[in-house]
Amino acid sequence: MTGFLLRVLSLILVATPALAGERLLEDHFERSEQNDQEEQVGNGWGTNSASRAKGNKQVDLVDGALKITRHPVADHGVSVVHDLEFKDATISLRFRIGEGDQLGINIADMKEKSVHAGHLCVAKIRLNKLTLMDLKTGRMNLETRDRSKAGKLTAEDRKRIAAKQKEFPLQLSADTWHDLQVDLKGETMTVQIDGSTVGQFLSPGIGHPTKSRLRLAVEKQAWVDDVTVDRNDS
């Protein structure tokens, strides 16, 4: 009987889904690089500096925070990535951007082949505007992207792409730390800044069931600190 009960318990544990509220990532960047001339973010983070900035350093650990700066030779914005497995999640962090800067919280599934580079959805924060985008069924769909690159977008394409994003006005102070929370639940993305809800968007690509990568996307410069990711799967 004991052996039977152990087998039943084992099956239950295997079949039990991950619990909502499980902390998948926590990083306060309270560390230093061993070599300040190199990118050594640590704690499972990676960057695109080798492929997009000819190996030049773009991400630095400074005073217990993450400083992200696009190098002049880079042919693409900076992407700081961490692989995580979830369906729904709450992503929280502190950020600081200046005039003309932006920070993107980009979610990807690197195994999803219907989109470019796994792009599923993104929240882009500027000082004056928040943009929420469904990339999977919008501009990063491979067929749509190919037509865009070839200059052959149809009127229907443009209409569909426009429907896959929503903008919300903001009035954020430049070069000031702000609190950010991005909630992904089903097909809905909700963003809070400094404790207030500033935008919400419902679209099918957001509900993609297998998300595997968090990207911090920076066009010019941004500071990030106190990153946590908590599973929200039901």
Image: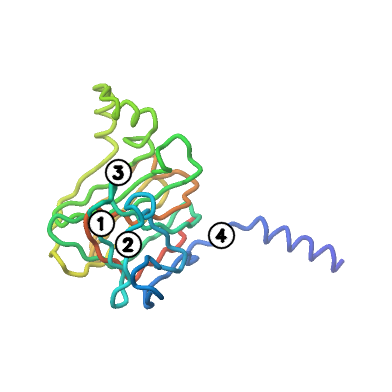
Secondary element at image label 1 = loop
In the rendered structure, which disc, 1 or 4, sits on the residue that comes first in sequence? 4
Q: Residue at 69% x, 59% y: name it.
A: 12
Counting from the top left corner in percent of width and height, residue 231 is at 47, 60
In the rendered structure, which disc, 3 or 2, sits on the residue that comes first in sequence? 2
Q: CA distance from mark 3 to mark 2?
A: 29 Å
Q: Nearer the viewer, residue 41 or 86?
A: 41
Q: CA distance from mark 3 to mark 4?
A: 27 Å
In the displayed structure, would residue 65 be above or below residue 138? below
Which of the numbered marks, if any, corresponds to residue 57?
Answer: 2
Residue 134 at least partly seen: yes
Q: Residue at 29% x, 66% y: name it.
A: 224
Q: CA distance from mark 2 to mark 1?
A: 7 Å
Residue, disc 1: 71
In the displayed structure, would residue 143 be above or below residue 217? above
Secondary element at image label 4 = loop
Counting from the top left corner in percent of width and height, residue 182 is at 33, 57
Residue, disc 3: 133
Residue, disc 4: 18
Task: Using the rendered view, name the quadrant where residue 154 is placed.
Answer: top left
